[in-house]
């Protein structure tokens, strides 16, 4: 894992050198000061936010305070779409969110395509991933400098689910995005759109029978209070993406650019560590409150969603690139 994280940092350093204009400052720009507004959907205390705090700590320390970072948790600066637009315009410098800015990266979240957060890292640090980052820079003026891990997406339910047939006709809240909708249709469920703020009451009142999210979201939203089971489907991995305005990034002295890239890598590792620690604590607490965790027949779920991967993957990337992504997403990383 550490080798993979190092790999993406080295690749991103290469992108910093080759992906855009030359830095407008010399390497020795240590007397210049810069301010970074860094926004996110994540709330204080969440693993992703702890990773952002680690990033801030490292950057401010290693630049002797010449780069100051102001964190804005909980969508304080607007929705994800609004934050992305602000980063493109340079109104704010950075954000982290589930929106990578382009479909080619977004659809790595297809069901059972990526086997872990580490596999995302492997794809993003590959030649294909570098090409996508170049495209982001050239077409939208933003670049990805890292990720913040999130837990695999799982299902909570009031019925025990061990195989796809157990979901037949089940009303499950899922985001109104094609790959989510088609995934649960392929599993026999009835995906039902619902604003996130209404999910708790929807589960409580039986408007929907279940929902899907990372475990940390289920816990923080209290869904386990109105659900009997958590099904470890692990049907999608999707990290948050650390995005920065490229014009701003290029305005930094090159040594500061390197510090940001290295700090993003350390922030990612810190968030992963906290994610793993918190998952065990959350699971234990939820079990004490009466929730049963179920390990289903994963191979049956993979087989049921094969057509979703194949059809949407080929549509987004073309057959050749799709096959390369499939291989990278399932490779042995040991």
Image (cartoon, rainbow, N blue to C red):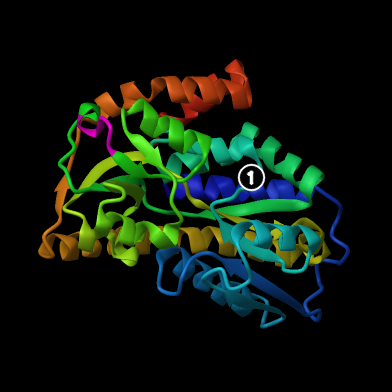
Q: Classify mark 1: helix, strand or loop.
A: helix
Locate residue 267 relative to residue 26 in the image: left or right.
left
In the rendered view of the protein, which quadrant contains the C terminus?
top left
Q: Residues within 10 Å of mark 1 (few under 14, many from 20)?
A: some
Query: How many numbered marks does the figure carry?
Result: 1
Specify the principal SS of the magenta part: loop
Residue in the image at 50% along x and 49% along y: 5
Q: Residue at x 36, y 57 (%)?
A: 199
Expressed as whole percent of the image width and height from the top left, the position of residue 184 reads 37, 33
Q: Which residue is mark 1?
A: 11
Residue sitting farthest toward the top: 319
Q: Position of residue 207 (x, y in %)?
A: 31, 50
Answer whether residue 308 is visible to the viewer in this image: yes
The one of 22 and 112 positioned closer to us in this rendering: 112
**Residue 79: quarter of image:** bottom right
Image coordinates for residue 83, horizontal then vertical, percent: 66, 62
Residue 168 falls within the magenta-colored stretch:
yes
The image quadrant that residue 304 belongs to is top left
65 relative to 220 in the view: left or right: right
Residue 191, magenta (yes or no) = no
- Relative to residue 267, is residue 236 depicted above or below? above
Could you tell me if residue 324 is visible in this image? no
Residue drawn at (60%, 22%) of the image: 315
- The answer to which of 167 and 295 lies nearer the viewer is 167
Hey, which quadrant is residue 31 in on the image? bottom right
Q: Residue at x 44, y 30 (%)?
A: 182
Residue 267, percent from left and from top? 50, 63
Question: Which segment is the magenta one?
Answer: 166-170
Tell me if residue 178 comes above or below residue 45 in the rendering: above
């Amino acid at each position: 894992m550490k080798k993979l994280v190092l790999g993406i940092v080295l690749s991103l350093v290469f992108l910093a050198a080759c992906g855009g204009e030359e830095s407008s400052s010399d390497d020795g720009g240590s007397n210049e000061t810069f301010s970074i507004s860094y926004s996110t959907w994540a709330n204080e205390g969440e693993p992703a936010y702890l990773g952002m705090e680690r990033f801030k700590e490292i950057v401010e320390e290693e630049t002797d305070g010449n780069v100051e970072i102001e964190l804005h948790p909980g969508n304080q600066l607007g929705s994800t779409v609004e934050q992305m637009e602000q980063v493109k315009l340079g109104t704010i410098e950075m954000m982290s969110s589930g929106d990578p800015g382009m479909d080619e990266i977004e659809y790595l979240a297809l069901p059972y395509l990526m086997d872990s957060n580490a596999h995302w890292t492997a794809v993003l640090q590959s030649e294909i991933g570098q090409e996508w980052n170049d495209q982001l820079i050239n077409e939208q003026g933003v670049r990805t400098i890292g990720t913040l891990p999130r837990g695999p997406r799982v299902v909570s339910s009031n019925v025990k689910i061990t195989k796809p047939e157990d979901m037949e006709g089940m009303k499950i809240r899922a985001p109104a995005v094609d790959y989510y909708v088609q995934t649960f249709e392929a599993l026999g469920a009835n995906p039902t759109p619902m604003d996130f703020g209404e999910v708790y009451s929807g589960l409580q009142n039986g408007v929907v029978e279940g929902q899907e999210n990372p475990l940390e979201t289920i816990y923080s939203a209290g869904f386990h209070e109105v659900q009997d089971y958590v099904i470890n489907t692990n049907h999608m991995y999707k990290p948050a993406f650390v995005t920065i305005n490229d014009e701003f990034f290029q305005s930094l002295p090159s040594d500061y650019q390197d510090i940001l890239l290295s700090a993003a890598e350390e922030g990612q590792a810190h968030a992963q560590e906290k994610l793993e620690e918190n998952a065990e604590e959350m699971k234990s607490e939820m079990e004490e409150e009466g929730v049963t965790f179920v390990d289903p027949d994963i191979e049956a779920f993979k087989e049921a969603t094969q057509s979703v991967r194949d059809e949407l993957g080929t549509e987004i990337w073309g057959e050749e690139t799709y096959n390369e992504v499939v291989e990278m997403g399932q490779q042995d990383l040991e």
